[in-house]
Amino acid sequence: MGSLVRSGIWFVILVLFYTSLSGNFVSAQNRRPKNVQVALQAKWSGTPLLLEAGELLSKEWKDLFWDFVESWIHSVDSVSDSNSAKDCLKKIAKYGEALLSEPLASVFEFSLTLRSASPRLVLYRQLAEESLSSYPLDIIDGGTTEPNEIAKPKNSEAFLYGTNLKSPGNKCCWVDTGGSLFFEVTELQKWLQNPDDVKDSAFQQPEIFEFDHVHPGSTTGSPTMILYGALGTECFKEFHIALSEASKEGKVKYVVRSVLLSGCESKSSTCGAIGTGESLNLGGYGVELALKNMEYKAIDDSTVKKGVTLEDPHTEDLSQEVRGFIFSRILERKPELTSEVMAFRDYLLSSTISDTLDVWELKDLGHQTAQRIVQAADPLQSMQEINQNFPSVVSSLSRMKLNESIKDEIIANQRMIPPGKSLMALNGALINVEDIDLYLLVDMVHHELSLADQYRKLQVPPSAVRKFLSVLPPAESLSFRVDFRSPHVHYINNLEEDAMYKRWRSNINEILMPVFPGQLRYIRKNLFHAVYVLDPASPCGFEIIDTIISLFENNLPMRFGVILYSTKFVEMIEANGGELPVAHLKDEPEDISSLIIRLFFYIKENHGALVAFQFLSNVNKLRIESAAEDSPETHHVEGAFVETILPRVISPPQDTLLRVEKDQNLNELFQESSMFAFKLGLTTLECSLLMNGLVHEPNEEALINAMNEELPRIQEQVYYGQINSHTDVLDKFLSESGVQRYNPKIIADGKGKLKFVSLCASFLAKESVLTDLHYLHSPETFDDLKPVTHILAVDITSKKGMKLLHEGIRYLIDGSKDARVGVMFKANAGNTLPSLFFMKVFEVTVTSYSHRKGVLQFMDQLCSFYEQEYILASGVTESYQALIDKVLQLADANELSRKGYESSLSGFSAENMRSYLNKATQFLHRTIGLEFGMNAVVTNGRVILLSDGNTFLSHDLHLLESLEFKQRIKHVAEIIEDINWEDLDPDLLTSKFISDIVMAISSSISTRDRGSEGARFDILSSEYSAVVLQNENSSIHIDAVIDPLSPSGQKLSALLRILSKFVQPSMRLVLNPVSSLADLPLKNYYRYVVPTMDDFSATDHTVHGPKAFFANMPLSKTLTMNLDVPEPWLVQPIVAVHDLDNILLENLGDTRTLQAVFELEALVLTGHCSEKDHEPPRGLQLILGTKHRAHLVDTLVMANLGYWQMKVLPGVWYLRLAPGRSSELYDMKEISEGTRDTTSSKRITIDDLRGKLIHMEVMKKKGMEREKLLVPADEAGHSTSKKGTQNNWNSNILKWASGFIVGKDETKSTSSPGSSGRHGDTINIFSVASGHLYERFLKIMILSVLKHTDRPVKFWFIKNYLSPQFKDVIPHMAHQYGFEYELITYKWPTWLHKQKEKQRIIWAYKILFLDVIFPLALEKVIFVDADQIVRADMGELYDMDLKGRPLAYTPFCDNNKDMDGYRFWKQGFWKDHLRGRPYHISALYVVDLVKFRETAAGDQLRVVYETLSKDPNSLSNLDQDLPNYAQHMVPIFSLPQEWLWCESWCGNSTKSKAKTIDLCNNPMTKEPKLQGAKRIVTEWPDLDLEARRFTAQILGENIDEPQEQKLPPAQIHSTIDDSSQDEESKAEL
């Protein structure tokens, strides 16, 4: 009965609808809703899905790649499960998921559809091209090839343009040995059978990278063989089987790089080539259709005659609600009324769009939205539908009755968090909501799930797993102070006791008083202790002593001291294992440092510290006077001693000198001082400064910086009462965070990325060496839990390796209750029988006797014996009888079982030992990344590599233990102690088991790339205004605060919905809308593009890829399209028939769907370049290229944060300093684990879609410290008009890479028929246009410039917003009219405040990046607005003398009195700010780029912009207000008034003199641009017709000819020869 009533109601509604709209219905039928569809393609051609699956699995665990290869090779390829792309996707996913557990399998399948591994395969293409590049591919006949340097491969650089390599000689697989290539398995097998050939190849092995797949059977040190080929091809299978066997036999190290070459698709299995046939369509980005402000009509009135019309690819989703109706249900009930119901739906859709609401309707809109979301059956879907279709749903939202409880809770929460603020945390760690994208989020979630999976396999309960995943990494700012308190510190002053500071105030609270910047606070308190550790005979030591005395005499409020040591003496200590044998004490050779230090001690003791410091200064003075080399001589020291004490003594100083030199007490003091410096670990730095224990560089600038950094820490503690006038500040700081030793490898202080490896997966692997490892413990701690595990990787055949083992044992003898030590011995070609026997003894001892009291002494004595007899002894012996005897003797002496050793060692097998060693070495190489011959310490996953120059002492192990325990391990150990191990056999619950779990979990947690910041989400109420989704079984928890009506809310709602679908996390989303809105918060439609299974065809092998689809968009509203892409992506439209800036769907005619295709043109590689203790090296030139081509793209470093950027595609790239002044002055520094060596290049791997942020440090070369990088033109001895001279560092040094990545037609040097009239210097003109109308204006501007000059012209266009049509036409136009052009771009830096509106972004590009967007060789450029008409020779303006100013603009004219009310610069703020300077118009300006870069004008403008742009009311005309506001910093040369005339501001009386006419907007009349152009500029219609005719001719279109039209002016002819392409035409940033 109810259904009959409802049917009747619908019938009545439809009848009423027909009746009321009978007059309008026909037009409604004609106005069928229109759709918009957007796709984004990668620059590179498609990659095989099968190979992508292998790469995705290897990210999970390296061996899974090989498991996948084996299972696929041995699978039966049936046609039934490979009929279509979708079938193949399911088949590939099935094989991959079989190796994974849920929910990792779901993430794997989603990542496969997302195509996130495609960039890795593009990287392999680059390496494949390099592999083939030295070989003459035209002579391949199926055999082997030898290197040929001259031959040029046909495929060379194909990967630069994204195209796939062609198969050489129809071969799809080959093996690269570094010396030769094998294309046939038979040839390879012959070669493998000849051991001499294999051995020879070891000397020229190809380079292996971290991402490479190394076969698990491979042995370290074997010759490397890289197989290039694709799983699924027969040749791959044959090579794989042969190389797997050779690898297992220990003959080769087998590596696979997956490449399916062009032409090999047909040779692959049915599913092996899926994904290669078409362009790679990407997902993971947003598309916005914004309602455009049409205050000034800026739409091109010329209609599109021809275009691409595709069938609608989507059917409309009828399940979505429209004004309260769900039409899918209506149609189910009334199928016979389908056409009428759909017409009714179309009418509703076309009448629901709102871009304005009354104030009272806006008041509670945010709260009403929150209510709609919270009350929905699927809140995430509801949030997404609302904020992605907001203009269509806002009317119904504003009419909702509001629940006051929701409003009250939101307002209460907003007392703790600002309204509209969005935050998100994944397992407790905050994520930057502005920067997050789908690829990054999937990676983070995958890593968390992977860890959770491993922890469960370790039998950790789920509740504890969640706690582990919520552990935050330590804050980077955590600093450690070196505890240097000791009598060996010699102070020159004491602020609290010395008479010279008596007048200073002693109240500590003075430190809180405000002072002027740079002013010091003179407080009679030892707050700042500057203690230098130095060798007094070194050059830096002399410099420091002079600095100390100078600063002391100038009353700097700081306590200065020194710790003295002798470098020679420290070298002796190191040579003797960190101790000085007594035998060396008496007859130790004399050294200058020793003499200086002993004399210093004597003078200090007898004459005071000040005189002692004066003695050190006198030594340097005498050294300089005698023009001695770096080190002083004995007579300098003795002379300085005599000179210093002569006025103070009665007896002859020479007698005193002789007595002092022989004084044994002073000698012991000197030795103790040197030993103290050595134990502190600071002797490795030569000279260093300790500021209250913090280590700094020892120069004066660093001292002041260190003082300024320490000041706020002291102020904070004084403010909170933790420091008062009686506190000893040094004691307090060193007691709280002091360490006994400094080692730059251990305490990195943020100076280099620490290396962590996860030991979790290795622990779970079958037959893992880690599981079988036994440990040594400190006495009587065998059964205790040991949270810290040191694994020593030792090469026992080396002295350094033996030393490390010895120090590890001594560390345990010294005592450590929280740590244990395990030892892994490394295989080495020099392993003798004694060394193998020693390892066997060690293994037996650790396995059977590690709990015994005397075991450490036994091992310590055995190590000493072995070192003395077998390492230090000359000659190699294979006899180990003496070792056997010693073992048995020491076993007796240390109460260990002699019989036990005899029985255990009787069956010693060298072969078994070698087999174990190979296994251990393989683990160390593959998991730890340990190279051949190196020793290492691995502490709970933190890897410290020890090169030959490093001494690693037991003190270092103590430091490592305390540091790692405090920072990383403590939290994990605390969680583990609280675990209730219910399901575990009590016999398994040993201290070793628990210690192993602490090691595995703490190591894996440290590999996570996540921030250390968290937030207290739990303080926000979530009863009424939050979405809470519980899932107790999930190891992923999302906390978020979201404003659903914000741009970030649009993206976050889509990302959260994806997570909800694939991972089912628990979520707590607190809604935080702005409470009182003044305007609509969103004026756009938004779609986030996510791949699905439906992107893969179910009928053939086509992969369509994901697309954004907007159904039923408003017809009469003007929309503008923007893409919201991940930060590193640089995209451009490549297919767009219609104007994407001004989309008016009612003009589409019969076409139902507007299509647009964009291209991911490049990824942006960004970085920050620094120079220690200096400003960033502004203007430093960097180049990027491959191993064989060093220079493909270049850039320069900004002063702002040392920022730089370049465009790249996936691959292995090398960053270098550009030849010329940059590389003459600077070296790059290689920063790793605290060591800093110079390097010629930095390798950068791009193998994902997330780009890279690179931190690099440079240092001035020796002797170049005072040289300037940027030499002004007059100083460099050349004028700006000179080009190509040797001195001009920014001319011929850099060859800008034309066409790299950005395509071949981006730079054009053209030659048109018969055009030979252009001569002289090139005029460079820069412009920007967006939308078809402004592109139409731009062509007219080009023609007007060319008609009035005989000089060559080059145009520079910002290509970000140019339409595909314009980019198609401009090469033909350049050829026809004889000009050059170049398309340039620059990605907006992440650190610079970003504009939201497209128009404001375009304005910003006109002014913010002038110093970096053009090639360095370009010296001057003129900006001309697209809507400008030129009536004069621009050469006159180009050559104008700007009087040394970087910029030249035309002031606004003021002779049109009607506009006086609109001249804002004549009143208020602008009048006061300008102080009589003119306000200039930005439609035309000249940039002297040489002066602009020299004066850092770009950096200054960006600083001003950053300051002002955060205020929404400032910079309303950004491109114009910014340079005018900054005139006092970046001076402007005012051009003569006639250079720019515009009707709005200038009277008609001056029009006749105008050299350019600008169609600027008139705020009074708001006349449309086109209408004004035809009325104001007489020549405009002719120029327009000429440009339109030319465009139509190129595009094959017709145009509407005017009824009466003069003949178009004669075509402009000019010739610019192709060969004369200068270097300016070779650039694209």
Image (cartoon, rainbow, N blue to C red):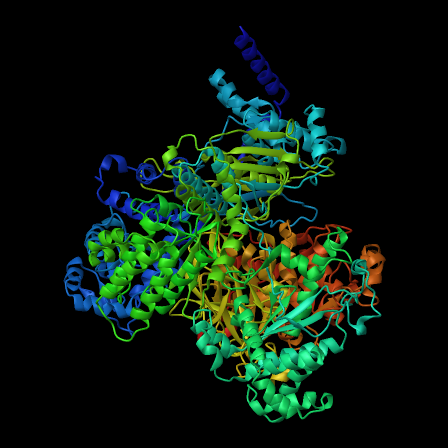
Front residue (pair 1333, 686): 686
Expressed as whole percent of the image width and height from the top left, the position of residue 534 reads 58, 75
Front residue (pair 1494, 1111): 1494
Q: Is 1024 situated above or below 451?
A: above
Q: Is 846 situated above or below 207?
A: above
Q: Is 920 situated above or below 11?
A: below
Q: How many labels does the image show?
A: 0
Specify whether 1582 is left or right of 1037. Answer: right
Hey, which quadrant is residue 1247 in on the image? bottom left
Q: Is 909 situated above or below 1537?
A: above
Specify whether 899 is left or right of 343. Answer: left
Hey, which quadrant is residue 373 in on the image? top right
Expressed as whole percent of the image width and height from the top left, the position of residue 1293 reads 50, 77
Hey, which quadrant is residue 401 in on the image? top right
Residue 572 visible? The answer is: yes
Expressed as whole percent of the image width and height from the top left, the position of residue 485 reads 63, 65
- Identify the residue at the far top of this view: 1
Expressed as whole percent of the image width and height from the top left, the position of residue 1545 reads 78, 60
Front residue (pair 1549, 351): 351
Residue 334 visible? The answer is: no
At x 40% / y 44%, what residue is drawn?
992
At x 72% / y 56%, what residue is drawn?
1508
